Structure formats: structure tokens, C-alpha cells
Image (cartoon, helix red, strand yellow):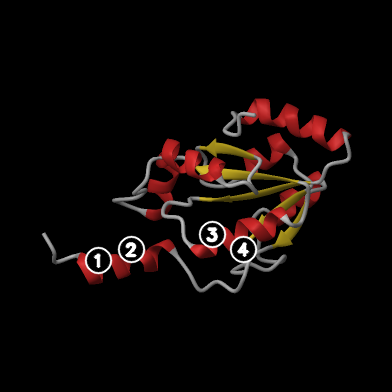
Amino acid sequence: MRKIIKRELLAKIIARLKKQGKKIVFANGCFDIMHVGHIRFLRSARSKGDVLVVGLNSDASVRRLKGKGRPLVNENERAEMMAAFEFVNYVVIFNELTVEKTLKTLRPTYHAKGTDYTKDTVPEKDMAAALGIKITIAGDKKKHSTKDLIKTILERYGSEK
């Protein structure tokens, strides 16, 4: 089974899975440098349903969100790493700054966000509600970030040649 799929084809697969009674969970992010917080978030998201779809920000959208020098890992390699996880069923790369277009196209059962959100602070909550997509909060308390990991690497190894 191919896991990295274009949005329009994935929408057809999801519609078929939902007709079979499967609960589809959508989780998204940049996932530039994988860390334990990402793993905990994705495993928790997967536990909320039967199928986990990961929306991955494209290189262009990561640059617009995170700034110069990001991403450190290109979108194809990030997608390949994401697809290697057994708990991830599908990966879709999106170019927009938000996941609204992807949610409208895929129409998953659940939209999972990390614990740095509440159901009331999820940016897509109104649009998701209008589409019948439930919001779920997943993962452990946010104590890890790519930004902090990059800072630690620079502090420890930045002066080495």
C-alpha cells in the first residue's frame, strides 16, 4: 500500500473507508525534525480512530510559517519518514498555511490537534463543525519543540567546525 498520496485521491479513499464504518483521524504539522513529542502526538491521534492521515506542510508553507532556514528536511524526505511509522496510514502534503482546504477535501471524522490547543482554540474549529468534523486533542503535555531542539544543537555544536 502506498502511503504518500495526493489530496484528491486520498479524499476518494477516505470516503470509501468511512462507508465501511472506519473512523478517520487527521493530524497535521511541519514535522521538520522528528522528536518524541511528535511521536506521542501521532500515536495518541491514531488511538482516537481506525485510520491516521498526516497532513504535512510543504517546504514552501514551512518557510512561510517558520521563517528563513526552515525546513531543515525537505518535504519528500519528511513524508517518507512519516510514512515509515506503522501507526500512520496515509500522508498528504499541502501547500497552504492552514489545513482548511485539506479538511474540506478529505472530510475526516476527527481533526486532531496537540495539547497546546483546547477544543475552543483550534483555528479550524468553526469550519470543522460546519463539515461535521469532530475536534480531538491528542498527545502529552507540550514539553518538546523543533525550535528548542535546534537551539540546543546550536548551543552544543554551533561553534564547532
Q: Is residue 109 left or right of residue 113?
A: right
Which badge, 3 or 2, is on the more N-terminal residue?
3
- The residue indicated by pointer 4 is 114
Residue 10, above or below 107:
above
Name which residue lies at 81% across and 46% down. 23
Secondary element at image label 4: loop
CB atoms at circles 1 and 2 under 8 Å apart?
A: yes
Instruction: Calculate the distance from the C-alpha at mark 1 to the C-alpha at mark 2.
Output: 6 Å
What type is the residue that disc 1 sits on?
Leu
C-alpha span from label 1 to label 4: 26 Å
Q: Earlier in the sequence, mark 3 or mark 4?
A: 3
Q: Is residue 7 left or right of residue 157?
A: right
Q: Residues within 10 Å of mark 3 (few under 14, many from 20)?
A: many
Asked if labels 2 and 3 touch by Cβ distance under 8 angstroms, the answer is no
Give the image location of residue 140, x and y in percent: 62, 70
In the picture of the structure, the residue carrying the numbered disc 1 is 154
User: Dot 1 lies on which element?
Assistant: helix
- Disc number at residue 38? 3
